[in-house]
Amino acid sequence: MDELISSRASSAPQPAGTPANTDTANGQVSGVSPLPEGPVPIGSLVLADELPDGVVVADEAGRIVVFNRVAARLTGLDPAEVIGKFVFDVLPLRDAEGRDWWVYADPYHGLPTRTRHPERSLYLADGTEILVSVGYVRGGLGGKVSPQERGGSGGCRPPRDNRVRRLVISLRGAKQRERLERSRAELVSTVAHELRSPLTSVKGFTATLLNKWGRFTDDQKRVMLETVNADADRVTRLITELLDVSRIESGRMEVHRQLVDVPDRARKIVAGRVAAGDAEDRFRLEVLDGLPETWLDADKIDQILGNLVENAVRHGAGIVTIVVEPARLEGEDGNTDAVAVSVRDQGEGISPDVAPRVFRQFWRGKPRGGSRTSRHGGGTGLGLYIVKGLVEAHGGTICVRRAPGGGAEFRFTVPAGTAAA
């Protein structure tokens, strides 16, 4: 079924008996079929103003017959004023080298087998950059050619009528792509910076040990090897973070559910921090009664808890309190059993104007009080972004707010799940 693309300026309902080709504002034939009478099957009609991208359609003579609302916003032109005008006058597209796209692409007189131009950056007369892709409608309506038109030889010969009937131009703003490119450039810069320091250390200590092994005592060798081991772990963590970011952005984060004791996982995270040198009395775990049986991804829950506790230790102050309690989570099938975990510190907290940004990539909070934070380093700024992605992969939610006793509180809620989930 051929879909009709229409706009307010070019597709007003036509009286009965109106021919398929309608007159445009300047009296030229538009080549766009009128709206059908009677019931319209779902999916057979697309209103151009409802499309998310800019759409411009030109007929076989190059005159504009559709100019939707998004195209008007991107170009700053009034659809009522451009309908019926030549598309190459309305959209004087040029490439980065200043060449006229209409001249070198020559869509109406170029290769008769061409069906589309892939998306590329072009510029309007005022220098505005837009992303443009072009599609061709050739031959009869919808580009279809009957077997008779194809001729004999089993239909192997090219169709006789391969003229351009319509030119469909899609326009998108370039700002989103610019933001994506900046984000990728920042990611590359961050990765390069974070890798340089541990790799320099690993290279330096291993080269020193290889060249001067006999000059060092056993204790000195142990210190060097422990440093190399710690820096290797740092590189491994960074690579893991990058892989997690990639999976989150591509929607490929998988959750492997198993029966998980959330309070027990929290105890293990705290024990790991104490073994690494943090004071035991700096942590407090509170577990409320009534916790549901939880089926979660154990490794990802460890990662979530570990990142939130590390964030509280690095950027907060005072006692870090972990509260595990039963909760209810709204879903498509109503409220479901869930478990909520809050990680609180006693620092200065996070101001409301900063709170919406903490789960973005590369956010690095300033220490919120306490002298213990200086030795932990700055991190990559990916931890909380990954935490949010892991929580949402479980179907849960996460937020940051002011803790009851001051400081910051990160609270995530995940559905209990089932063994078959």
Image (tube, helix red, strand yellow):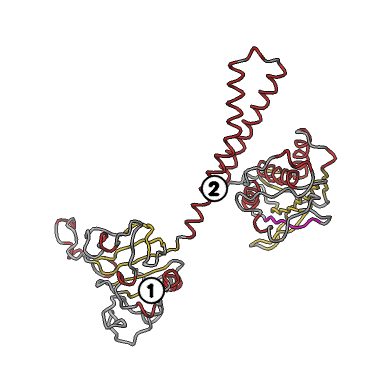
**Rendered location of residue 284, percent (x, y):** 83, 44
**Rendered location of residue 248, percent (x, y):** 57, 49
- Give the quadrant of the N terminus: bottom left
On the image, which quarter does residue 85 sit in? bottom left
- Examine the structure image and report whether residue 399 is included in the region drawn in magenta: yes
Residue under label 1, please give it.
67
On the image, which quarter does residue 108 sit in? bottom left
Residue 238 lies, with reference to residue 120, above or below; the image says above
Residue under label 2, please give it.
186
Q: Residue at x 29, y 85 (%)?
A: 18
Residue 132 lies, with reference to residue 390, above or below; the image says below
Q: Amino acid at mark 1?
A: Phe
Furthest residue toward top? 214
Q: Residue at x 49, y 59 (%)?
A: 176
Q: Residue at x 27, y 60 (%)?
A: 105
- Examine the structure image and report whether residue 293 is included in the region drawn in magenta: no
Name the dominant secondary structure of the magenta segment: strand
Nearest-to-viewer mark from 1 and 2: 2
Q: Earlier in the sequence, mark 1 or mark 2?
A: 1
- Secondary structure found at label 1: strand
Q: How many residues crowd mark 1 within 10 Å: few (<14), some (14–19), many (20+)?
A: many
Left or right side of 32 for 356: right
- Secondary structure found at label 2: helix
Residue at mark 1 to residue at mark 2: CA–CA distance: 37 Å
Q: Residue at x 40, y 74 (%)?
A: 77
Residue 130 lies, with reference to residue 36, above or below; the image says above
Q: Nearer the viewer, residue 27 or 182?
A: 182
Q: How many residues crowd mark 2 within 10 Å: few (<14), some (14–19), many (20+)?
A: some
Question: Which residues are drawn in magenta?
Answer: 397-403
Q: Nearer the viewer, residue 314 or 20?
A: 314
**Rendered location of residue 133, percent (x, y):** 36, 61
Q: How many marks?
A: 2
